[in-house]
Amino acid sequence: MKEYTVNGLSASGTANKTAGNVIGSTAIRPLVNSLIFGILTDPNTTDQQARFQVGNTTAVGTAGSSPTPKPRDPQDVAAVCTAGITHSAEPTYGSTFHLDLAVNQRGSKEWGCADGKELAGAASANNGIGAKLASLTNAGQALIVIGWRE
């Protein structure tokens, strides 16, 4: 399987700001196997938690940018899945999330999984996996790195 990475920023704010969304097709679904979460903006004066959520999306929303996924192996062909970052209109998420976690605003969090344990998007157009900043005490901008296989 081919592996790809995309980096994304959320729009600035305190809640429900998707930093990145990997979007599958009817032929290929993304299998997310690594994530890195962090806050790009300066923290406020007290230690606060940023809440991140990762889940399946059923509509892509309106991305501010659609970066080209980078193959982890430079010999691989271009990705079939696409990506969106810095959304102005949020993707539609399912009612539950694969990951719902708090990260101190001064740090970052890395998540990875073993082969066969990836977070899978549906093999359907406009469906995928999204990662969002669900809440933050002060306005901030989240940074996400998403890795996947297809």
Image (cartoon, rainbow, N blue to C red):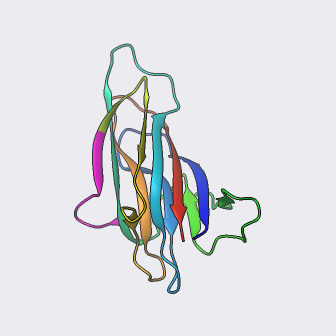
Q: Main secondary structure of the magenta part?
A: loop
Residue drawn where x is 29% and y is 57% of the image:
98
Q: Quadrant of the C terminus?
A: bottom right
Residue drawn where x is 44% and y is 83% of the image:
124
- Quadrant housing residue 90: bottom left
75 or 125, which is in the foreground?
A: 75
46 or 77, which is in the foreground?
A: 77
Q: How many marks?
A: 0
Whether the magenta-drawn stretch holds residue 97 is answered as yes
Relative to residue 59, is residue 20 depicted above or below?
Answer: above
Relative to residue 107, is residue 13 depicted above or below?
Answer: below
Relative to residue 119, is residue 124 depicted above or below?
Answer: below
43 or 110, which is in the foreground?
A: 110
Residue drawn where x is 68% and y is 61% of the image:
68
User: What residue span does the magenta drawing correspond to?
Assistant: 89-101
Q: Position of residue 99 (x, y in %)?
A: 30, 51
Q: Quadrant of the N terminus?
A: bottom right
Tell which residue pokes out farthest to the bottom in this image: 26
Residue drawn where x is 40% and y is 19% of the image:
44
